[in-house]
Image (cartoon, rainbow, N blue to C red):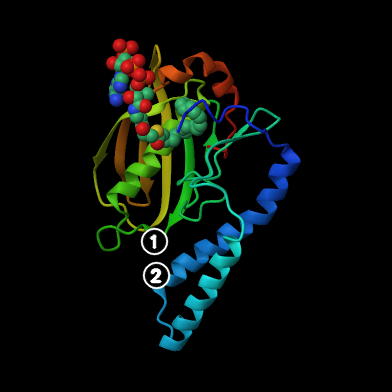
Amino acid sequence: MSLIGDFGVDPMTPEQFDAEAALFGPLTDSVRTLMEATLMSEAEADDVARARALVDEAAALLNTRRGGIALGTRWGTDGIRRSWGNAVMGLRNPVAPPLEFTHDDDGPSWAEAELGGLYEGPPGLVHGGVVALLLDQALGSAAFYAGSPGMTGTLTVRYRQGTKLGPVRVEAALDRVEGVKSFVVGTVITPDGVCAEAEGIFILPREVRHLAGELAQSFHPGEG
Ligand SMILES: CCCCC/C=C\C/C=C\C/C=C\C/C=C\CCCC(=O)SCCNC(=O)CCNC(=O)[C@H](O)C(C)(C)COP(=O)(O)OP(=O)(O)OC[C@H]1O[C@@H](n2cnc3c(N)ncnc32)[C@H](O)[C@@H]1OP(=O)(O)O
């Protein structure tokens, strides 16, 4: 996939985005509920079998018309980029917890989420890869917000204590910029305190360096 290939192709109007969000946002929430129920159900065998048939029917309905293998990044006529397929914050991605970032002018970017059993690694704890996933997004998003976006070049995570399933806060802030590299730091925090710390180097790929300004302008909190 070409990084630049998606730029400016058939931009959608805010009204089109709103209509799609109104239609698919609630579906995403319902599927998230379904995923949690699938994990935790102790229903009778007949009910599980019937639920499966219903799910299969729903999937067949949704697949009557579909796009390619991924949603990709979509651009609006307002210049804002929507990353609704994003695995951490995507509006149409039921795998996303989802995290919604707030970007304070004078503080770190942060988001809070309730992480249930879908994200388990060790018993009762968030999977370490999921912790890294959240940090990757948080750091990347902070770099974007600061006006120096990039792809993750290096992400270093120090796990200080297990992250219990439940309420989780993720924070990130830009440390410094050196040329095309943004150095970002962040933490994952629960009521037990800091569970993980990360440092990341985000690099604007050479293929899109000429679009740095447009990219930075396309950032909108909550859109990835
Ligand atoms: C975000 C902008 C780019 C994407 C644009 C397209 C659409 C935008 C849409 C969506 C927004 C995207 C992200 C949202 C935010 C967060 C989401 C999470 C982020 C991810 O989930 S992202 C997936 C995982 N990520 C990868 O899949 C990267 C694979 N990789 C590459 O794409 C290249 O490898 C790249 C680009 C890293 C470098 O390639 P390149 O050719 O552009 O860089 P180049 O060689 O010119 O080096 C320039 C300077 O960086 C140093 N340097 C090079 N590589 C380094 C490394 N790995 N670590 C530390 N320093 C490194 C050199 O030493 C030199 O340093 P110096 O200037 O000091 O000499």
Figure quadrant of residue 176: top left
Q: CA distance from mark 2 to mark 1?
A: 7 Å
**Mark 1 closeness class: few <14, some 14–19, many ≥20 residues within 10 Å:** some
* Circle nearer the N terminus (2, 1): 2
Residue at which label 1 appears: 118
Considering depth in this image, is 108 or 60 the residue closer to the camera?
60
Check whether the beta carbons of the residues at disc 2 and disc 1 lie within 8 A of each other: yes
Residue in view at x 31 percent, y 52 percent: 163
Q: Secondary structure at mark 1?
A: helix
Q: Quadrant of residue 82?
A: top right
The type of residue carrying mark 1 is: Leu
Q: Which mark is residue 188?
A: none
Report the disc number at residue 39. Answer: 2
Q: Residue at x 71, y 46 (%)?
A: 18
Asked if residue 29 lies left or right of residue 158, the reply is right
Specify the quarter for ligand 1.
top left
Query: Could one spot residue 194 in this view of the protein?
Result: yes
The amino acid on which the numbered mark 2 sits, given as a three-letter code, is Leu
Q: Secondary structure at mark 2?
A: helix
- Front-lying residue, 217 or 171: 217
Q: Position of residue 66 (x, y in %)?
A: 58, 53
Crowding at mark 2 (Cα within 10 Å: few <14, some 14-19, many 20+): few
Could you say where residue 64 lies in the image, as x and y percent from the top left?
61, 61
Indicate the position of residue 167 as horizontal and vertical percent values. Answer: 43, 54
